[in-house]
Image (cartoon, helix red, strand yellow):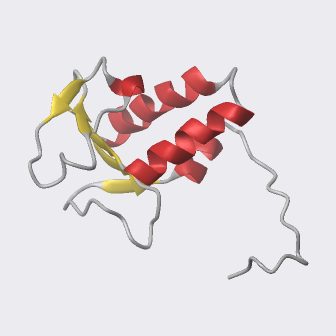
Amino acid sequence: MEFKEFNQYKKNIDERYDKYCPSYILDDGSIFYIEPNFYTQLINLKLHFDKEFDKLISSIVEITKRNKKVIFTGNFDSPLVNKEGFIYRDINDLLAYNHLSIDIKINPESDWKD
């Protein structure tokens, strides 16, 4: 699985996760994983923040350089990647880092509830 937004970074070889969750190595040796659900959420942000999208991608690199080992997950409760010594960040963390938010309008009368 390849995510074109990260093609400029060196691919990390991790046989355990490579099939479904790519990881990348930055010039300073920092490593980040992008889970598929996170990537889907990230791409969907482009609909809301087209002008800021490149900054969102850059922020992933900034967060990784600051923390050295990061897994960008779609779900904190059930991450696909479990690695010792890594921190987890989700799409809300990325939005907060960029001082962005999405107002999701939910119909309280909908039958589609948890």
- Left or right placement of residue 62 versus residue 51 in this view: left
- Front in this rendered view, residue 70 or 42: 42
Q: Quadrant of residue 62?
A: top left
- Left or right placement of residue 75 versus residue 13 in this view: right
The N terminus is located in which quarter? top left
Q: Residue most toward the front?
A: 111
Image coordinates of residue 43 in percent, x first then y, are: 55, 37
Image coordinates of residue 93 in percent, x first then y, are: 56, 50
Residue for point 85% across, 58% down: 105
Q: Residue most toward the top?
A: 8
Image coordinates of residue 96 in percent, x first then y, are: 64, 45
- Left or right placement of residue 59 versus residue 4 in this view: right
Q: Can residue 82 be seen by looking at this rendering?
A: yes
Residue for point 24% across, 33% down: 24
Q: Can residue 97 be seen by looking at this rendering?
A: no
Image coordinates of residue 13 in percent, x first then y, are: 11, 38
Q: Is residue 79 above or below residue 91?
A: below
Q: Count the labels in the image.
A: 0
The C terminus is located in which quarter? bottom right
Residue for point 70% across, 30% down: 49
Residue for point 39% across, 56% down: 88
